Every structure is written in C-alpha cells, then in structure tokens.
Image (tube, rainbow, N blue to C red):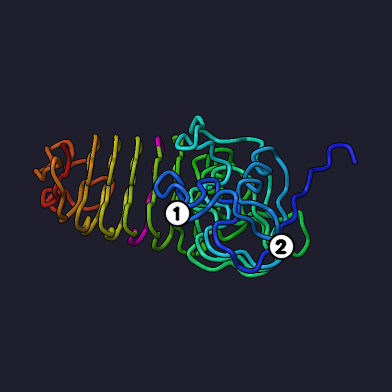
C-alpha cells in the first residue's frame, strides 16, 4: 500500500550488534571484530543499517543479542556522517528477546520487543506502543528534546524528563543538545552524558565509569560517586560529584571541569581548590552547607 514502510526481515538467534550504526566501533578495529558485510539470516549488517537510515523497518525474527540498535539514528562522523540525528530513521521490531545494552547512544528511531530485555539498557525509555504485544522503546535524548510521552512511573514535562523506573542505563542522555533537565532516580551505568552538549543530568545515586566522556557542554550532577575515567576526553561543561570521582579522571581532557570530594586525575589536568564562586555553586547544586563545599576539589587544565 502507498505510504507503507518497507520491511527487511532478519532471522536471528541471539547474534550481537544487529542494527548497530557503529558496527561495534568499526573505526577502532577495522573489521577484526565485526565485518560489515557478514550476514545474519542472509542479511548483512551493512544492509540492516542502510535500511534503517532510509526509514525502513527491520524485523528481527528470533532473539537479538547485546548492543541491538547501538547509535541508532546517529549520522556518525567516524563513518563519514555529519554527527547529528537522522530524523527519518526507521524502526526495529524484535519477535523475541533482546540482549543487554540495547540502544546504547541511540538518538532516533524506535525499538519494539515482544519478549524480555536484558539489563543494563542503553539510552532508551519505554513509551506507549501502537503495536499490540510489543514494548516500545525510544531514545531518552529524543524524548527529552521533543517532549515525547513516556510510560509511568517516568514523567515528561516542559522542564525535562524524570526517570523513576529504577532500571540501570548506559549512555544516559547521550548527545543531548537541549537545555532541558534529565533526572534519574537511582544509579546510572557507564558513560552517562557521553557527547552531551547542553542541559543538565542529575543522578540520584552512583554513576559508572566514563561519566561525561567526550562531554561538550552542560552540567552533570552525581549525588553518589563515579567509576574510573570520569570526564575522559571532556571538551567543556561541568561534572559535579558528591563523592569520589574515581581514578584516571580527566584523561585526555581538553576543557571543562570536574568537582568532587576526592579523586585521582591524569595530567595535563591538575587538582586545585575551587574559588569562592565555585564553592557557592557546589553548595547550591549538591544542596550541602557552604562549609562542606569548601572541602571539595576541582580537576581541570
């Protein structure tokens, strides 16, 4: 029928990296981990991504392994793109279960799953599904940008998105360009705020390794501690940590600042004491007395 989406069908049995726009970070391994033209059920990884980029539906018949739809809807500069979203990105429908890390760094499109989804999730949040018998997941970043409706207990408003479902997510708020706020009740996984450019992310708990990696602006507030490599390759923005920033913080840092009670940074970043204005900012952001904020450290160039 006219206007009906084309469907590419893939028979799968738990293969990883299906519909992965990064091809498992192809620019790092150059095909040693994942051959773009290797096939699953007769369909190549390259063909799956091309179909989604053109707005088609990819239907996975069977279980999908880990990293399904990684960087879904991103026009990756590393693969010759412009770095922004691909607005016409198609959808993935899984007739089965999906593995962990589904939708890591996802920016556009939608993923429908009839079975279970293994934790941790990627940068996805559940929305109301128009397909009976399937759960629908959209990008956290797109929901935040466009005010997309999400399912309770999560809440969307003009100010931003509050995630209250208690599920662990990697790459939360990836590539966020909007000034809105993202609030997470509970702990976050790895790479919170990766490549974010604006707005704020507040995590009411701990955050995993690589928090704020490649961050380009905005503010991340962690009400617990973070894993190692906090602020790695950070360009701009602020990361505020109530507890420990871990080891190897600020690796290859180009700009921005990390504030924490303690942590170990790598040169050329260095540790110093925040000035009076920064201490006042820490007091407001963490809701702690100014006297306590005076005990914090700043890691920057």
Left or right, 213 with respect to 165, comes to left
Question: Where does the magenta region start and end?
Answer: 197-207
Identity of the residue furthest to the right in this view? 1
Q: Which residue is drawn at 27% across and 51% down?
A: 230
Q: Which of marks 2 and 1 is in front?
A: 1
> Relative to residue 14, is residue 200 drawn left or right?
left
What residue sits right under mark 2 in the picture? Answer: 11
Q: Where is residue 265 in the image (x, y as percent from the top left)?
A: 16, 50
Q: Is mark 1 on a helix, strand or loop?
A: loop
Residue 5 image position (x, y, % from top left): 79, 43
Going by the picture, which residue comes out furthest to the left? 272
Residue 173 seen by the camera: no
User: Magenta stretch containing residue 278, yes or no?
Assistant: no
Of label 2 and label 1, which has the lower sequence position? 2
- Judging by the rendered image, the residue that carries numbered circle 1 is 32
Q: Check the image and name the residue furthest to the top.
A: 82
What residue sits 48% from the left and 64% below the top? 120
Q: Does residue 43 appear left or right of residue 201 in this picture?
A: right
Against 202, is 180 above or below?
above
């Amino acid at each position: 029928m006219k206007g009906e989406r084309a469907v590419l069908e893939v028979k799968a049995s738990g293969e990883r990296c299906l519909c992965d726009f990064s091809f498992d970070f192809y620019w790092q391994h150059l095909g040693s981990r994942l051959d773009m033209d290797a096939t699953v059920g007769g369909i190549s990884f390259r063909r799956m991504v091309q179909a989604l980029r053109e707005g088609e539906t990819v239907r996975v018949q069977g279980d999908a392994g880990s990293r399904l739809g990684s960087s879904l809807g991103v026009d990756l500069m590393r693969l010759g793109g412009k770095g922004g979203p691909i607005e016409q990105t198609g959808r993935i429908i899984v007739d089965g279960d999906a593995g962990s890390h589904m939708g890591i760094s996802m920016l556009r499109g939608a993923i429908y799953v009839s079975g279970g989804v293994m934790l941790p999730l990627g940068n996805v949040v559940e929305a109301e599904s128009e397909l009976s018998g399937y759960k629908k997941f959209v990008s956290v970043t797109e929901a935040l940008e466009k005010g997309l409706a999400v399912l309770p207990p999560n809440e969307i408003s003009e100010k931003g998105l509050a995630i209250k479902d208690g599920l662990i997510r990697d790459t939360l708020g990836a590539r966020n360009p909007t000034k809105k706020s993202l609030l997470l009740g509970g702990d976050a996984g790895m790479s919170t705020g990766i490549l974010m450019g604006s707005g704020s992310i507040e995590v009411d708990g701990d955050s995993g390794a690589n928090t704020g990696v490649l961050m380009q602006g905005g503010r991340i507030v962690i009400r617990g501690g973070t894993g190692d490599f906090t602020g790695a390759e950070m360009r701009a923005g602020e990361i505020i940590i109530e507890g420990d920033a871990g080891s190897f913080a600020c690796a290859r840092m180009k700009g921005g600042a990390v504030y924490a009670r303690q942590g170990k940074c790598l040169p050329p970043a260095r540790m110093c004491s925040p000035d009076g204005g920064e201490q006042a900012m820490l007091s407001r952001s963490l809701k702690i007395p100014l006297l306590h904020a005076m005990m914090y450290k700043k890691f920057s160039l």
